[in-house]
Amino acid sequence: DAEITQSPRHKITETGRQVTLACHQTWNHNNMFWYRQDLGHGLRLIHYSYGVQDTNKGEVSDGYSVSRSNTEDLPLTLESAASSQTSVYFCASSESGTGRDTQYFGPGTRLTVL
Amino acid sequence: RKEVEQDPGPFNVPEGATVAFNCTYSNSASQSFFWYRQDCRKEPKLLMSVYSSGNEDGRFTAQLNRASQYISLLIRDSKLSDSATYLCVVNWDDYKLSFGAGTTVTVRA
């Protein structure tokens, strides 16, 4: 069965360290997204990609970067982790070419920055 | 102003009851609307898409009012397993989605 996986599921790091969160999907979807979820907020879009070599900033992209070298993977990098980046991170993917895309989510990564 | 606003609840209802709640959205150009369900900070999962004419999926009924820019979800004959946070989701550009903060429903025995 097709799926979307994230690793690690939990991560504790220190302020200033570089952290990379992995996202891998086997749906063969062109579109991939990274969100963060914090209490009292809806999911907020960090970065997204509509295909290989395509990356775009979302509404809360400062301090984050992504790269898309193949269809299956969209790793999210925190260049220099800050305590404000403590959050739950979700990766999602969707098909392109339709107006009613359903996004399928990975299980999430809970990141704590000390 | 948030793009999608929801009453956070919680809505505490007994088994078998009907519960309904709305969300409002700000982007009048939005074309796609969804309800997602999220359990205990696990990943959101699609509950149902919302169509202009309204639609049902078993005990769940979704309505869309474009003129007033709100979406509703009604759950009939509530089950314990319906306890969750329900996310109102609206597309706002290409394939990007805007999520409400969620409405929490707790069904008690």
Image (spheres, rainbow, N blue to C red):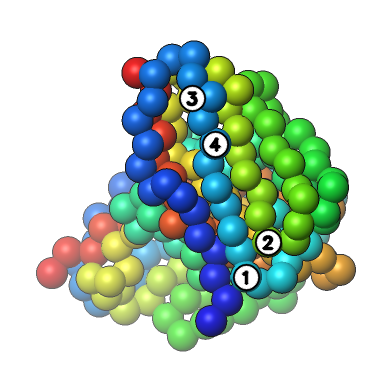
Identify the mark nearer the N-term, 4 or 2. Answer: 4
Q: Is residue A8 visible?
A: yes
Element on which disc 1 rests: loop
Check disc 3 and report the residue beneath it. A85
Element on which disc 3 rests: helix
Front label number (3 vs 4): 4
Q: Residue flagged by tag 2: what amino acid is it?
A: Glu
Identify the mark nearer the N-term, 2 or 1. Answer: 1
Task: Give the farthest residue toward the left.
Answer: B109
Q: Residue flagged by tag 1: what amino acid is it?
A: Thr
Q: Is residue B3 visible?
A: no
Check disc 1 and report the residue beneath it. A26
Element on which disc 2 rests: loop
Position of A17 compared to A23: left or right?
Answer: left
Label 1 crowd (10 A; few <14 / some 14-19 / many >=20): some
The residues bearing labels 1 and 4 have C-alpha atoms spaced at a distance of 20 Å
- Residues indicated by labels 3 and 2 sit on the same polypeptide chain: yes
- Which of B96/B4 is in front? B96
Q: Chain of mark 3?
A: A
Position of A66 compared to B8: left or right?
Answer: right
Position of B50 compared to B17: left or right?
Answer: right
Q: Is residue B95 above or below residue B54?
A: above
Identify the mark nearer the N-term, 3 or 2. Answer: 2
Residue B3 place in picture, x, y as percent: 67, 38
The residues bearing labels 3 and 4 have C-alpha atoms spaced at a distance of 13 Å
Check disc 4 and report the residue beneath it. A20
Identify the mark nearer the N-term, 1 or 4. Answer: 4
The residues bearing labels 3 and 1 have C-alpha atoms spaced at a distance of 28 Å
Label 4 crowd (10 A; few <14 / some 14-19 / many >=20): some
Q: Residue flagged by tag 4: what amino acid is it?
A: Thr
- Residues indicated by labels 4 and 2 sit on the same polypeptide chain: yes
Q: Chain of mark 4?
A: A
